[in-house]
Amino acid sequence: MRNIKLFESETHKFILLNESEPGEEDGVRSNQYLVVHEDAGVLLDPGGFGVMPRVLAEMLRYLPPDKVRGIFLSHQDPDIVGGIATWLELIKAPVYISRIWMRFLPHYGLKDMSQFVGVPDAGMDCEVAPGFNLKIVPAHFLHSEGQINVYDPVSKILFTGDIGAAMMPMDKDDAYVGDFKSHLPYIEGFHRRYMCSNKAIRCWLETIAGLEIDMIAPQHGPIYRGTAVREFLDWLRDLQCGVDLMHSGGRFSE
């Protein structure tokens, strides 16, 4: 468990609320984030059912549930959406997810979909509260057909869901990526298998090219900052992955 302010000013905070333990989320650590502007906040990928009590406890250090003005779900996986029905017992605010996953959400025990906003394929600008604006950035086929990212223009942090995710061993607990080359073994296999194609990667890189990014905050593993941001994006640009590696019979080259 950790609670780290990735960015803080007098009116704005971007917080890594919690890093779940491997046993809580099917053996993979996951990150849950809170962005606070003045007295309003949003949750990014609040996590599965098992981590909800811990994430809530960390969130309450900053603001009560009635001050949460939005929840953003990067995609449809249970380590992101599994606890949403319980969250919505406390939070009456819009929940943003790609429009293509709206029809799947009732399978998580949701009976009322009135709080959900289907994000269009092109993404959207979102005014969370007066003076609190976030940009929803499309990241199609980069693990999920309808993945969305969230860019915070104040902190200049891009929340990327599974892009940049790392499968860290138990004895590694760094909050930030240090030496990028030494970090590669923890991201390479995952990205080769779970990202759809290099074409999808390049479309995403074009989409984010105009953003000023100081940090990349993924759903799994440490945060990219400083030179690690550019090194990661440069590495990703030429990565062969997904269908690029397939041979006849559905076999992969690795």
Image (cartoon, rainbow, N blue to C red):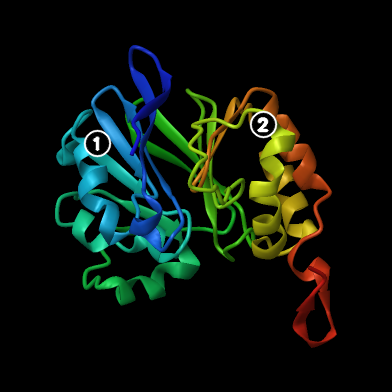
Amino acid under label 2? Answer: Val
Image vertical order of residue 92 relative to residue 176, above or below: below
Q: Secondary structure at mark 2?
A: helix
- Residue lying farthest top? 10
Q: Quadrant of the C terminus?
A: bottom right
Image vertical order of residue 92 relative to residue 132, above or below: below
Marks 1,2: beta carbons within 8 A: no
Q: Mark 1, residues whose alpha carbon is within 10 Å: few (<14), some, or many (≥20)?
A: some
x%, y% of residue 210?
69, 32
Q: Is residue 3 visible?
A: yes
- Residue lying farthest front? 171
x%, y% of residue 160?
55, 45
Tell me the quarter of the picture where residue 50 sits.
bottom left
Whether residue 239 sits left or right of residue 164 in the image: it is right
Q: Quadrant of the N terminus?
A: top left
Whether residue 178 sits left or right of residue 149 in the image: it is right
Image vertical order of residue 116 relative to residue 213, above or below: below
Image vertical order of residue 249 relative to residue 29, above or below: below
Q: Mark 2, residues whose alpha carbon is within 10 Å: few (<14), some, or many (≥20)?
A: some
Tell me which numbered mark, 1 or 2, is placed earlier along the sequence: 1
Q: How many labels were placed on the picture? A: 2
Residue at left offset 61%, top offset 45%: 164
Whether residue 63 sits left or right of residue 29 in the image: it is left
Q: CA distance from mark 1 to mark 2?
A: 27 Å
Amino acid under label 1? Answer: Glu
Q: Which mark is residue 58?
A: 1
Residue at left offset 30%, top offset 51%: 94
Residue at left offset 55%, top offset 62%: 146
x%, y% of residue 95?
33, 53
Dot 2 corresponds to which residue?
A: 229
Q: Secondary structure at mark 1?
A: helix
